[in-house]
Image: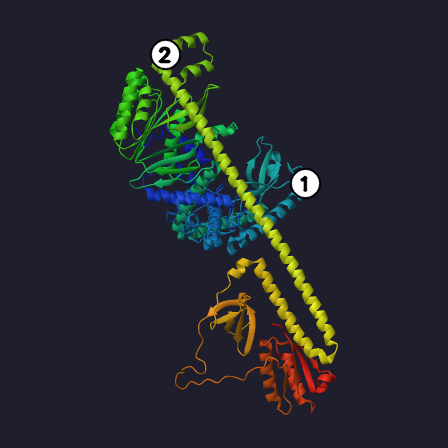
Amino acid sequence: MSRWSDDLLEFDALKAVVGRYVDSPPGRALLAALGPRTNAFALNQTHAECREAMTYLRDAAGPRQTGGDGAVRFHFAGLPEVTQPLAKLRIEGAVLDAAEILDLERWLDRAASIRQGLLAAAARYPAVCRYAHRIADLRPVIGAISGKILPDGTVADHASPALAKIRREMQRQRAAIEESLERFLRAHRDDGLLQEDFVTVRNERFVVPIVAGQRRKVNGVIHGASGTGQTLFVEPFETIELNNDLVRLAGEELAEVHRILRELTGRLREHAADIAAALDTVAVLDLLFGKARFGVDFDAVAPVMSEGPVRRLSIAGARHPLLEDVLRRQRKAVVPVTLELDEANRTLLISGPNTGGKTVAMKTAGLLVLMAQSGLPVPCDRAEIPVFEQVLADIGDNQSIEASLSSFSSHMTHVGDLLEAVTRDSLVLLDELGRATDPEEGGALAVALIDRFRGCGAFTIASTHLVAPKIYGATTAGVVNGSMGFDEATLLPTFVLRLGAPGKSAGLDIASRLGLPAAVLTHARSVLKDGERDLGQLLGELHQRLERLAARERELEEQKTAVARSAREQEQAASAREAAKLKELERRVDEAVRGFDSAARAAIGDIEQNATSRKAAENARVRASKTSREFQQAAARVLRPESAAAAVAVSEGVRVRLRDVREPARVRRVLSNGMIEVEAGFLKLQVAADDVLEVLPEAAPTAGSKLPRNVTFASGPAWAVTTREVNVIGKRAEEACDEVDKFLDNAVLASVERIRIVHGHGMGILKKAIGELLAASPHVTSYYPATAAEGGAGATIAELRAG
């Protein structure tokens, strides 16, 4: 008896299906050796790698060869078979032939490409790409042998200088021999000596064909004759030495080729251990990606292997992979199976019509357990599977004429073996328990056996047609009844497994559908006992109610989904409408601001036409800029109230950092209109509370506070906000430039846009120095001589950058 019942569950046939996705012979050898394991940690690690490999393949499955995360498509098909050459490398003194070295070169090149691809994707796929570190960097050895063996398996001329020289000499020697023989042919072309007018090769010697009867007329060595004996192939004496030299060169060529092959073999032998490790790793990767391709193609998942005292066997939407493989070719779909067992409910009894799928459902669960414990993805929507130490199954008819065993005897013998082998960590599969005997006795025996397996703590799935097990399932804690669906209208099974109620066998209904005479069926129904007939009707009504309940649940779920979808759509539509309104309001505000700015600039421009009104124009410009800014801030508070609500809370006396202002400021007053009054350096400003970026900690001590020893504080000169000019007449150029430079800094802090520098006429030294200073200042956009009303050539006007 097999510990895993893999023969009954057709595990080898399943591996044959998976094998279609594994490309290399070493990878298929690993698959053939694959079997169930019982280490939960190792299995979960294997499934995590497979899950990541399936993600890798899906990412790389786009129209391009690589996905967005650098997932390169790996191809293991066509890898040369290098097991034998690698074995020869382990034999000291053995020399690989050219074809074997060429196969190793091609294999190493593919392995290097696989390694590079894995390293490039390591950040995204760490579990899979860790195998890259098991493949050594063999590019140096690849470079040492690359190109020295030609695709036809011959050693290339450039493999060594000596070989190239020998082959050049051989080419010249052949040309000399051919030339000598051509002279011979021309000399005897018309004397009837030649059978054919060409040069050929016999026994690796260049010869000419002559008529057999004319052999005494030629001095030379005969190397053969034609099949008819009419032609002799003769090497004239004058070419013997030339041919001897060619044979000598051929020997030298062979020796040099052998030396090169021995040298290349030695280079490969130095890395034999790394090559062997890389060969094993590539085989593992081939199997891993083969399993992943199977998983993607069969829409499978990597299961979770539950461990510890709380066991749970839960498979949702499971499909038997062999059945799915067959039905795919017929363009049909498998009806999925969903079942769940846990510590509280370890036994499932499946009943229902003949040909209704009971055995397939049981085999599906058993095969998926074997797949999961072998590290294979399982074809279902979701799977959590405990680690079993064995899968015990009694499926099919084990009748043996040779052993004088009837169906029932064989059945009971096998079940007795299962009873001896069962443990708490076993999965037991029992098909038609209690079959092939009296239904009442068989039913009683089935109940006793199922209860024994349940008492051992094993997970058990059994199918039955008998009444006693159905009643046992309905009345015993820890046992779940399940039924395969049957359509009363069409008298066809639906193959849907439903948990919670037993099913009826519907044998008479199926016999009717299969065409048995009506009189026979009527007689059969009349023979049925009232209790059996009533039980069948009760089960039929129960399943009809369950069908209606399931349909109602599906309808409610669809309605719930529709309501949720409608709510999302309405929310999205409302958000879109609100965003559109907000965008339109912002557009109108922007237009209003632009219109205001344009009108303000035009008005100020008109005022500036009169030189005496330029100071008033400057004040108007400042007020217009302030009004525009306040309007924008007010509009922002209306349009984006959440932004205003998120403003930094400030109070009087705190230090703050303001938007577009380099120096920290101190809050003097909090005004009622969303504005605050601050002091920044020597400036007093009113700004919007939204312009406060953060509240700062207190600065270092100021004048009047207690200072450390040897530390003094002196405040700078105050800046008068209304001052717009500086007078440097009578100062030296260096002093004047320093004063103007400080004046520029203060003017920028005060948001002054235009200043006047009075330097007088003199010799023009001050004017020139100040002009150079203004030209280099980052604050100045332009400067020019003042008008006659503002001082003429004795003063310079500077326009400053805003903000």
What amino acid is labelled 1 in the image? Arg
Estimate the x, y position of residue 234 in percent, counting from the top left.
58, 40
Pick the residue in front: 71 or 730: 730
Q: Which residue is mark 1?
A: 189
What amino acid is labelled 2 in the image? Leu
675 displayed left or right of 184: left
199 displayed left or right of 452: right
Q: Which residue is mark 2?
A: 528
Foreground: disc 1 or disc 2: 2
Residue 404 shows up from this direction: no
Pick the residue in front: 203 or 129: 129
Above or below for 146 versus 614:
above
Pick the residue in front: 492 or 788: 788
What is the count of numbered marks?
Answer: 2
629 displayed left or right of 373: right
Instruction: Choose the circle earlier in sequence order: 1 or 2.
Output: 1
Above or below for 546 versus 313:
above
Pick the residue in front: 488 or 721: 721
Residue 224 in which image quadrant: top right
Estimate the x, y position of residue 347 in percent, counting from the top left.
32, 30
Query: Which quarter of the rendering shows the C terminus?
Result: bottom right
- Tell me if mark 1 has few (under 14), some (14-19) or many (20+) residues whose alpha carbon lies within 10 angstroms of its own: some
Q: Are marks 1 and 2 in contact (CB under 8 Å)?
A: no
**Tag 2 secondary structure:** loop
For the residues labelled 1 and 2, the Cα–Cα distance comes to 111 Å
Residue drawn at x 49%, y 37% is 560
